[in-house]
Amino acid sequence: MDASHLTTRMTQMELAQSSRGRDIPSHGPPMFHPGMPPEELKRRMDDYKAWMEEDNQIPPSPSLPMDREELLGMQAETRESQREWLRNGKVAMRMTVVGFPKHSSSTELRKLERISLADMLVRKTHLGRYLLCRSIALSVRASAVQLAVEDPDGTAYGLSIYNFPTMFDCPPNCADVLFPIGVIFAIREPTFKPAAQGRYPILRVDSPTDIVFMDPQDAILDGVSWRFDIRLPGSPELPTTVDGWKERGNVLFKDSQWLPAAIAYTHGLQLDPAAPVLYSNRSEAYLRLRFYSGALADARSVARVPGVSDALLEKALVREAKAEYARENFEVALAKFEEWQFAHSGDNAAAAEIATWITRTRRRHEESRTGTYDWAKFFVSSFKQPHLDIADYQGSIEVRAMANRGGGRGIVATKDIAVGEVLLVSKPFVAIYDSDLSEKEVTMNVDFLAGVSSEPTRSAVIARAVEKIYGNPDLHDQVFDLYSGVDYPAAPPSYPPAKPTEPTVVNPLEPNVNIDISCLEAICTFNCFNPFPIRPFDTPAPDEDSPTGLYLLPSLFNHSCLSNATWCCVGDALVVRAAANVTAGTEITIPYTKEGSYLERTRVLAQHMVLHCDCWLCEADRRDGEDALEARHELMEEIMRDRKTYSHAELRVQERKVNATYARTRGVVRPSLAFVQHAKAEALRRTRSAADSRKAIEEDIKSLESMGYVVLPRARKGGALTADGKPVMPIATDQVPSTTTFERPVMTMVRMAEQFLILKDDVSATKWLNGAMWIIDMLFGGSKAFFMLMVGPMLRSLGMDDFAMRVL
């Protein structure tokens, strides 16, 4: 440090000392914990906002220097405490906060000017600058990767890196491999923040694309000297040759350290950009990471190298085919697999594997082309593993700008569509289930955009989305063209964006994509689904946290409580089907929630930024008046809680109370009333008398009508088949009402069929089973086989499974 720099630093220290009393808010940030009641959560969130506003009023200022040895001691102590915690089998608690501004740089490193830690100010993002630093201690992995770093002058502080690929729930030592002692990297436009706890400020990086790892030959390091020894204690010996980097990458690859292996191969390619084995090996590492853009680009690079061996070309061909399969270019993938198969005859393990890939690819191609799926098979597979190997399909729909939605977008039918037609099958961009999370960690996600504490899976979705974009840069616009709220530029009128014709090369040293974390958090808040997989009736729901999934094209469907389409998930595949006959040019909507209570619907919709639903059900509810809506909500909560203990007479009283909350001018569709009517039917069934069985059937018919189903007169007359041999439907089949979940009408019809069997009326029992199966077929497809998988457990519990198999 030269004399002028030393003088400047001493002046900053004096300023820091003098401002010490005013650079800390009067209190620390409020703490959150899982399971907080909504009222307490709201109060804590208000307190947190107030704390942030108070902190934001404090101007940027220099920081007191941190003693390097003290930092190293604190890092070692924290690391040992974490290890002791894990050794004792304790569960680590994490917290992430969504909804506050987080800086993500979009300026190339070479266009920035270097800054030292001594010149940085606390509470400031240093635009136009970059910080060169290196790790000086082993890492600590919490909500972020926590490092101790120093700049060339030897000034040291803590650094927290959030959202770095593969780091969300990896074992603690994984971060040591990515950020070993001595690793040198640059931080684009670094942020220096006051610590929420403790005395010293910290560097904070929210976007992993702001981290640029330095290759030893990088020109940025020319003339850079480090105050302390270039070889720090504990730092690994780095290779200096292509073969050395290849061997290091291979060792890491065998240890399943895919990203560090890819980084090692990249260092080798910096020395020899025409080394085909490094492209080949990195391609395989990228396949394991699901960095399919990078895998495809590297596999193609192998073939471009003159004189490459046949063995490497064959490996590259298979890797190219697998990457194309993952990118859903099934025709191209099939051609690549068949090209390999044509050149390799014989019955060996490799040939058998490729034959399996060819079969899979043909199935996926057929699914994507026709929309025909073996839903029964996928349904059974989803019991063990929600992440399905399945193809996307887009039916007769397209995205258009919607004048009636203020210029926003929607999805419309491009031709006349019949009820039950498949409109869309979509795999998630990212979906996280409870089984995907580590049992040793629990992450609480506080979302200030939605005003809720969301599922632990929500934090993981954001981390995994970052990881996927990091390794598949050509998918960036598909995500960032989704709605992100009023704080960001309006989304383009069309979707999806055009795909690049060539895959993007992935450089893990210096990412060639910029990921705006704040914008991505907003996209996830406003567009994520809770993709609960459908399960067989009468099977207990698993005791686990709600899943979270980010789906791309499905996010463009607008909401209506009385939608003309509905959605469900078979495993993690989101399936949208027409719930009514739709004419060409009509907007297609789906329900974001199926809560019966208007108050509960509006609460859920507000989290999706739907502040007003203009469907006729909501309009009718609003005309009932606020007092009636509040009374209905409270009544339904009471009935839901105590329904199994109510007698039929007590339920009649409750029915009158609920009915009184509806205006007399309202029609027959009264979703809350439907629940009470079905509860009355169940109470009547418990008497086991023939007379009460008939009354129970009448109550269930009323319940179906209150849900919006039209029960036809022939439901009580004639045979079970029409003149041309088709099943007689007891209900109108022009729509599947979306006022409630599909389980309720199906279970109601099955219970009615049971009562008709008790009354020795097999014909009527068959009609109502046909009605239940029609609903399942319209919403899920699969006909009888799927119906028996879905409803079979309930039928068996009622002793009706043999009858159903015989008559359906």
Image: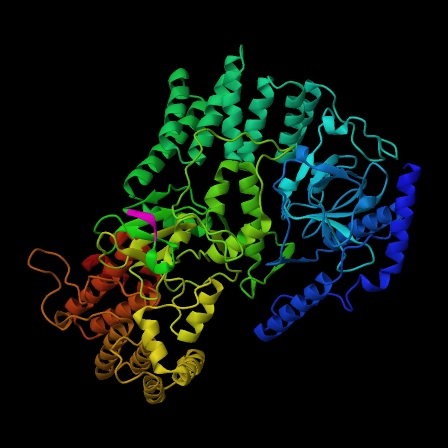
Residues drawn in magenta: 397-401
Q: How many marks?
A: 0
Whether residue 9 sits left or right of residue 344 in the image: it is: right
Answer whether residue 256 is visible to the viewer in this image: no
At horizontal 61% and vertical 19% (from top left) the residue drawn is 273
Q: Position of residue 310 (x, y in %)?
A: 50, 13
In the image, is residue 249 above or below residue 530?
A: above
Residue at the outermost top position: 307
Q: Position of residue 368 (x, y in %)?
A: 33, 39
Residue 687 in the magenta stretch? The answer is no
Corner quadrant of residue 113: top right
Answer whether residue 804 is visible to the viewer in this image: yes
In the image, is residue 65 above or below residue 690?
A: above
Whether residue 261 sits left or right of residue 75 in the image: it is: left
In the image, is residue 25 above or below residue 76?
A: below
Quadrant location of the C terminus in the rendered image: bottom left
At horizontal 71% and vertical 26% (from top left) the residue drawn is 218
